[in-house]
Amino acid sequence: MNTSTAGLIAPGRHDRKNPFLACVRVRRSLTLPGSGKDTRHLELDIAGSGLEYTVGDSLGVFARNPARLVSELLALLQLDPAHPVTLAGGRQVAFQDALTRSYTLNRANRKILHGVLERLPAGEARNAFDAVVKSEELAADYLFTRDYVDVLREFPSIRFESPEAFIKLLSPLQPRLYSIASSPARHPGSVHLCVAVVRYETHGRRKTGLCSGFLADEVSLNLPDAPVFVQESAKFFLPSQPDRDVIMVGPGTGIAPFRAFLEQRQQDGAAGRNWLFFGEQRRATDFLYEDDIHRFQKEGVLTRLDLAFSRDQAEKVYVQHRMLELAAELWKWIQDGAYFYVCGDARRMAKDVHAALLRVAQEQGGLSSEGARAYVEEGMMRTERRYLRDVY
Ligand SMILES: Cc1cc2nc3c(=O)[nH]c(=O)nc-3n(C[C@H](O)[C@H](O)[C@H](O)COP(=O)(O)OP(=O)(O)OC[C@H]3O[C@@H](n4cnc5c(N)ncnc54)[C@H](O)[C@@H]3O)c2cc1C
Ligand SMILES: NC(=O)c1ccc[n+]([C@@H]2O[C@H](COP(=O)([O-])OP(=O)(O)OC[C@H]3O[C@@H](n4cnc5c(N)ncnc54)[C@H](OP(=O)(O)O)[C@@H]3O)[C@@H](O)[C@H]2O)c1
């Protein structure tokens, strides 16, 4: 039997409600020893699934919690792992299974604070905890660094009466999205991802992000073990005219869709020029997809490459600094109708890149600040739809 068909959760169309169990065929590090990051390249087999994607789309992944974390929690709860519990959809599963696949465990929520408070006997400890629970700010700080194991360890006398009483307080597990890093024309039946693994330590325990940790440490290789679906993107796409130029700004994992774009442009024999701005912490350890990028250059598909390794010198250098250094040429490409794409961190990078683009329009285009906003935000973004972002 083909492993792909063995992986079907249910026959029919696969989507968020009915994900396909894909096999991870390849998982390798993109960062080298000595890096402060752990970023991985994954290749998932979706052959026979009926799943289709185009470059610019994302892959949704449902993770499961690590067995070690579930065991730690069960030991503290002292409840029967085999006890049947009913999930939201009405399905009955063992308590251990529900903890593994259906609820978020790597970050505690506000409901658990109330659950603990209700069960604490009157006294000093209860009063102190009551003050935390009642304050929006203290509760948020408390929860930022704690999972359920941390909370239960702080209150070892607390007992939940039944698995249902505990589960009632948990938050349902949500899938995570990853920008697809491959072109389906180049890699039929396969989806590539570029995943930065979230790892940190709090309260003396090593923690991982739910889904990046699952993909890096937990998912079995070559077995139908990764529940996935395709999330189409209506707002991040290549130009329909292949002779249009494209400018791609993708530091860190923001490189993912641009690897897919470059593969697709090469497959299509697109005549337009391609300019990539990439940045990471250090060139020696963090040049994600360096071989692919150099191959794209050698084969002529990547017309311009500008790099910003932020920690290779005393002063931080980011992609927007390169944009400003190359403002005249950048403006020329934009004036000639180039598409402008940004992918990666939404909180800081995308905002700073946006500000740099406005500055380029002002300084190179001789526009006022309102004129630059109108050109970039009304013109490029809204009317012409050639300033497109995939940020998170
Ligand atoms: C459209 C889209 C595309 C995306 N594409 C990609 C992609 O291509 N590659 C990629 O890697 N990601 C991508 N992401 C992000 C991805 O979906 C996940 O959000 C990311 O992998 C983290 O999820 P996680 O489940 O591993 O971590 P989670 O379990 O969600 O945990 C992350 C949380 O951990 C917390 N945290 C981190 N460090 C600490 C600390 N020191 N102390 C306390 N808390 C901490 C943070 O607050 C963060 O909220 C994309 C997101 C979107 C929406
Ligand atoms: N906490 C984690 O471990 C973790 C893991 C995965 C993803 N994430 C989140 O996922 C997103 C992407 O992470 P990533 O690993 O792909 O890379 P990233 O954190 O976005 O870093 C990529 C490069 O961008 C630089 N950078 C930092 N601030 C910038 C700014 N304002 N403008 C331009 N460049 C900037 C970084 O430099 P410096 O680092 O030298 O400042 C680094 O060189 C971010 O939101 C990040 O917070 C976090």
Image (cartoon, helix red, strand yellow):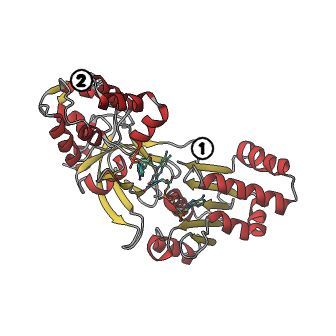
The answer to whether residue 218 is visible is yes
Query: Which residue: 77% across, 46% down?
Result: 379
Left or right of 21, for residue 261: right
The answer to whether residue 52 is visible is no
Q: Nearer the viewer, residue 13 or 104?
A: 104
* Percent of width and height locating residue 355: 71, 54
Left or right of 330, for residue 191: left
Query: Which residue: 72% across, 42% down?
Result: 382
Q: Nearer the viewer, residue 34 or 84?
A: 34
* Percent of width and height locating residue 171: 35, 32
Label whose residue precedes the other's in the sequence (1 or 2)? 2
Which amino acid does the dot numbered 1 rest on?
A: Lys
Determine the secondary structure under disc 2: helix
Q: Is residue 222 above or below residue 279?
A: above
Query: Which residue: 60% across, 56% down?
Result: 349
* Percent of width and height locating residue 93: 18, 29
Quarter holding residue 162 = top left
Left or right of 180, for residue 146: left
Which amino acid does the dot numbered 2 rest on?
A: Ala
| Residue corresponding to mark 1 | 235
Determine the secondary structure under disc 1: loop
Quarter holding residue 15 = top left
Marks 1 and 2: which is nearer the front? 2
| Residue corresponding to mark 2 | 165
